[in-house]
Image (cartoon, rainbow, N blue to C red):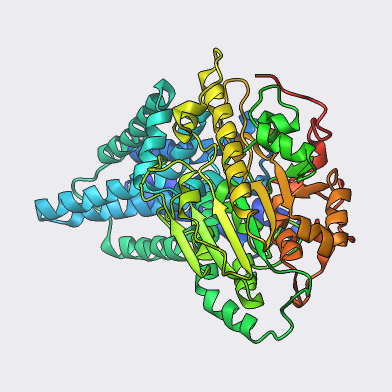
Amino acid sequence: MFRKEPFFNNKKSILRVSLTVWAVLMAVFLFDRLYDGSISFKSFYLPITTFAAILSISIYGFSKKIIYSFLWFFFICISVLVLQLCIDIDSKIRDYVNAVSFSCGSFALISLVFYLTCFIKNKKLSLLSKGLVFIFTALILLFPLSIWAYYLAEDELLTSDIILAFAQTNVDESFEYAESHLDFKWIVAFLMIVLSISATIISLKKAEIIKPKIKLSYILVISLFVMAQSVYVVPDIDYFSIKVLKVTGRQLEQFELFKKAAFLREQRLKELSSIKLNEASGGIHVLVIGESHCKDRMQIYGYKRKNTPNLLNYKDQNLALVFNKAYASFPQTVPALTYALTEQNQYKNKKLEDAFSLIELANVAGYETYWFSNQRKYGMYETPTSVISSAANHEEWINGTSGMQSIFYDDELLKRLPDFNDKKNVLLILHLMGSHQKYSERTPDSFKIFLSEDKVLDSYDASILFVDDFLDKLYKKLSAYPQFQSLTFISDHGEELSGGIYDHNPTKFTFPMVRIPLVIFCSNALKQNRGELYSNLKQHVNKVWTNDLTFDLMLGLLGIEGLPDYKNNLDLSSKVYSLSEKKAMTLYGKKKVRTDKNFNNAIKLRP
């Protein structure tokens, strides 16, 4: 008697039902897009990639093994959105659509290529080709699994800012960071990645077809469709994990464009006959860039430890102006200094490659420019900071190490300074190691005078004391020159030093990470010859200021005029300085400074 074949053994029935369900769901999806007016070519990505997944699975005869492999792969890709949901990060419908599209499109390619390896008769070549498929699968899954791993280890999402920070370090420094942060949670995170990828590869291996029975014409049609969507659709999908890498890539590309455009900027400046020096300006001007200085931990701002006695003394003698509401534009060195030393800032829409640097302008205006740094010049990638410094007439980086340590303390910079007696106009920029992490390595033993249960904080406070001593010696050395005019001290960013946290990670943002000092020494000659400028500075000591406006401030102090389309309303030394508390931003424009609970410096910390 004729027996009807069970439904799940009838591959054609499964394919028909799958395609019918797919057609209905996609029709509803596209109709919804059409109804709300958001339909575009990208609206077809979901139908294309899901159709590709169905076709790829169909050549395996819809076996349970390939379906299990697909579901596991799909779960890993979509889980990143579930993670965002669990930590109260808003995810839109399109984020889920993109995740589904990416996972289906990627698995369609992986499963198809793995199936095609079954046609390879040579065992060695077959093993090699399967191995390449497994490696490709692991690389695809590394994107979402890295998000999970970083969250498990650091309790935060992995972002482009973090990846960029790693890109700006070298291999040795990355290993040092990993060594200092390695703990049980990182081991668990690593095991999670290994086990998840292993489970996916094993499930795919189990679905292997020993003797393909599908017609070659059918396989050819499917292969063409799947390959086409893999080339033209999948790379264009804004899947969250891939999007993080794309954003990082665009930032690194912007850095490269800034470097390549240096010659063009130089040519443009040479053609500008309007650039000139104010008649009363010139002389020796100094910009000192500290590292990780949080003003909350400085005596001069009310901290209860005596770690800035010299600065406090200069303030009391009216030799230095101390500004009370200074903030960094970003809590990491390279992003902060990229804005601080160029025209680009949070309040001006200007491409980085088109932005003149402070040194480039000073050169054209007739200053002899010097750059001395106790930090490393290069990471894995060249950064805008090293490109900016390379424009200086004289450039020296004394830290030749590959890691976070330095051969010298910051006072070595004092010994490297040339004789300025025969120099008329000088811009000197000093970039300190300051209070960089591994605080205990930043100071000689003679400055380690603070004792408490928190040894890390003691070391940080000692590094602040050492920089205070450095500034004292630097001021005495340079103010002895008759042409000395000004010395400005800022920090690239601050540091969080409470609750056992010693960091400036932007994904764990707190305001101490951007609360920085701004101190300006002005010579008697400057006060006399440029009295209005000095008066403006005195009137602005309680005005809000962000260090991406260092470029504007230094133009004012240097007396450089004539830059086309330049407005001095963001120059702290100008009478028309107008950055309001309402408009002042940090974190590259993502946070308003006035939301800082200690905006008015009412909270004075104790060690």
Instruction: Examine the image and state in which quarter residue 186 appears.
Output: top left
Return the residue nearer the eye: 372 or 511. 372
Is 345 situated left or right of 474 in this image?
Answer: right
Q: Quadrant of the N terminus?
A: top left
Is 66 situated left or right of 305 in this image?
Answer: left
Return the residue nearer the eye: 46 or 96. 96
| Residue under the image location 63 percent in, 54 percent down | 480
| Residue under the image location 45 percent in, 27 percent down | 445
| Residue under the image location 60 percent in, 71 percent down | 360
Q: Position of residue 172 (x, y in %)?
A: 34, 43
Q: Name the residue at the top extreme.
A: 453
Number of labels in the image equals 0
Determine if residue 16 is in view.
no
| Residue under the image location 68 percent in, 52 percent down | 488
Relative vertical location of residue 512 with respect to residue 606 in this rendering, above or below = below
Determine if residue 440 is in view.
yes
Relative vertical location of residue 16 with respect to residue 233 in this rendering, above or below = above
Q: Position of residue 400 (x, y in %)?
A: 36, 51
Q: Position of residue 514 (x, y in %)?
A: 68, 40
Q: Position of residue 485 (x, y in %)?
A: 71, 59
Is 548 situated left or right of 392 in this image?
Answer: right
Q: Quadrant of the C terminus?
A: top right
Relative vertical location of residue 518 with respect to residue 385 in this rendering, above or below = above
Return the residue nearer the eye: 560 or 576. 560
